[in-house]
Amino acid sequence: MTRPIRPMLGEIQLEQVQLVQVDEDQVLTRHNIPALEGDFFQRLGRAGTAVELTGIQSGPGARDGLNELRAAYRSATALTFSADIVSATELDDVLIEQFEVSEHAGLPDAFEYRLLLRECTPAPEPEPEVPPEPRNPQIIVEDEGVLVVNVVKEGDPSFAGANTTVIAAGTRQDGSTLPETPLTNQTGARWTEDPFPAGEFTIRATATGAAEDGGDLSGSVSATVRAGATTEVTIVLRDAAAIAKRFIVHFRFDSAFVEPCLKAVLQQVADHASANPNEKMLVVGHTDLVGPTTYNQALSERRARSVFAALRFANDPARAVAEWDELRRTRSTNLHDNWGAREYQQMLQDLGFYTGRIDGNHGPMTDEAVRGFQASRGLPETGVVDDPTWMLLIEGYLGQENLSVAGDRFLPNCPGESLQWLGCSELDPVRNVTFAWRPNRRTEILFTRAAELPADVARPDTFDLPSPGAVAGSWCLNDSGTNTRCCFVEPNAGSVRHETCPGTLPRGEAFTREPIEPMPLFNVQGSIRFADGTPYTGAFFVTAPDGEYMDGERASTSGGSRAGTPFRRQPETDGSFFYDSPQKTPGIFILELDADVLARPEGAPIEDAKGPVVCKRLAGPQDSFDVIIVDQSVADTRP
């Protein structure tokens, strides 16, 4: 039999295929060892094979063929599939897991498609079971289990749990939020809560006055409580000075520009700094694992410098503007970040001059917005974003929030100098993935009670920039002459640090990072509708507070300028959407529409509608990301 030249999906032949990518994974489950450190993995066979197809379908029958595939997608109908690339893979029937289609403007009967196919494996017939005779049957409540928490003090086996508070918070099995709840059934250093709701929780313990200097000790652990079962966890108490509470600002691929929605996170940082004068700040930039380490080091420093300048704008506006003006320039030094139309579109939209898509194309709408901004600032109305326009754009953009953080709020560097920012290159990923993944592209703003940085750190590569040869200050945090960058923090859970750190640190203990607020996990849901209730049917994407694109992003190996960009999706026919995975924690979510429209969160004032990008804080499963499009006349609702 001759193998097919083009992929066949059901009775439809897919033409002009540009990408066929097969993904086969083994399924591993990690099990924690109760009351001990460490874990082990159990192999559960392989997951269903995934096949991604991208291409163009054209011709008189293209629309009808794609409609047939859409009907199979909506009804979850299994289809046969064959293609050369999967000839060595056992793959018969598939389900369409994701279905994206867009019509080429000006080209009739030409459609770009992206399909994600998943191997369809019929469930085996269940074997008949004869239930054994119940002996002493137990009554099991379907939504309750037992939670046991052991609290130990590092280096003190005699710790008895005096003056210790244990608090649980998270998401119950039914999706509702468990607010911070003290555990009360204490026996020594052991808490037993029977019953306790089933779900996913973060358990925190604080021992007041238990440190050697009379300070507090604290620790936390995640716990999954299952109905009818007992879950036992152990919290290790450590000096609270070694705990660093974390805010996160995430970034687009190969960029250090702080996007408009994320300025709300910087406002939270400034507010926290003002309300907690006993804590010091540390600003640290990171990258994903794409690209060489030397380039990523400079990029991580640019991200940290960008955040630091924004936080300190009101303290020294001229310096903050000068810093961003250097960052935005065409790359000729390690400090230049190569900003262009995408960045000034975002600035103009935040300032109320531009309402179109953030696409990086300087078209008529962008040109009109630039001219309007120039006129408002007394500049020649050229439509060209030249140096004077950039300077005033940056000043206006950062001045919107006008953030201020006192210089003494940062950890010390040399005597009389503060440690303003650091860069960790790709050495400290959230997760070890070698492709583009936005949560790894971040700046962390850490708050700690420590008096100084615990580890030596190599001098930053951009420390003397922007002016070649000009010294920005002294560097006093490397007495040992180390070349390490990130040994002052413990690695993220589930990742591997990509550098070797010494066994002991010269000035204390490596920071253990914790989220700034409790972490209930919840499913993200919402709706997109016009003001008259008509559902929006075009494409959109959502970015979570940790930076993850909810529908994934294109790997760096896909090539071109699309690397690291998000995949889109369409809402359901009623305008609603729901993500059954991944679950997320509270924070600022960003929804961006592929349409030239004005949109706002439902219930927000009309002034919040600045364009097709909408920001909203979600705190738990009770919150829904509902978006109203207030200007239907310019909507592009492509199928």
Image (cartoon, rainbow, N blue to C red):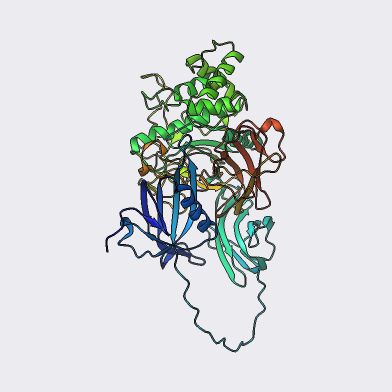
Q: Residue at x 33, y 59 (%)?
A: 86
Q: Quadrant of the C terminus?
A: top right
Q: Quadrant of the N terminus?
A: bottom left
* Residue 27 pos. (x, y %): 42, 63
**Residue extending furthest toward the bottom:** 133
Q: Residue at x 47, y 28 (%)?
A: 361
User: Quadrant of residue 12 in the image?
Assistant: bottom left
**In this rendering, does residue 479 appear at all?**
no
Number of numbered markers: 0
* Residue 428 pos. (x, y %): 42, 44
Q: Residue at x 57, y 67 (%)?
A: 232
Q: Nearer the viewer, residue 499 or 576?
A: 576
Q: Nearer the viewer, residue 573 or 478?
A: 573
User: Quadrant of residue 194 in the image?
Assistant: bottom right
User: Quadrant of residue 327 in the image?
Assistant: top left
**In this rendering, does residue 549 appear at all?**
yes
**Residue extending furthest toward the front:** 60
Q: Nearer the viewer, residue 278 or 133?
A: 133
**Image: 74 above or below 626:** below
**Image: 330 above or below 212:** above
* Residue 478 pos. (x, y %): 39, 35
Does residue 577 appear to the left or right of 155 in the view shown? right
* Residue 245 pos. (x, y %): 56, 44
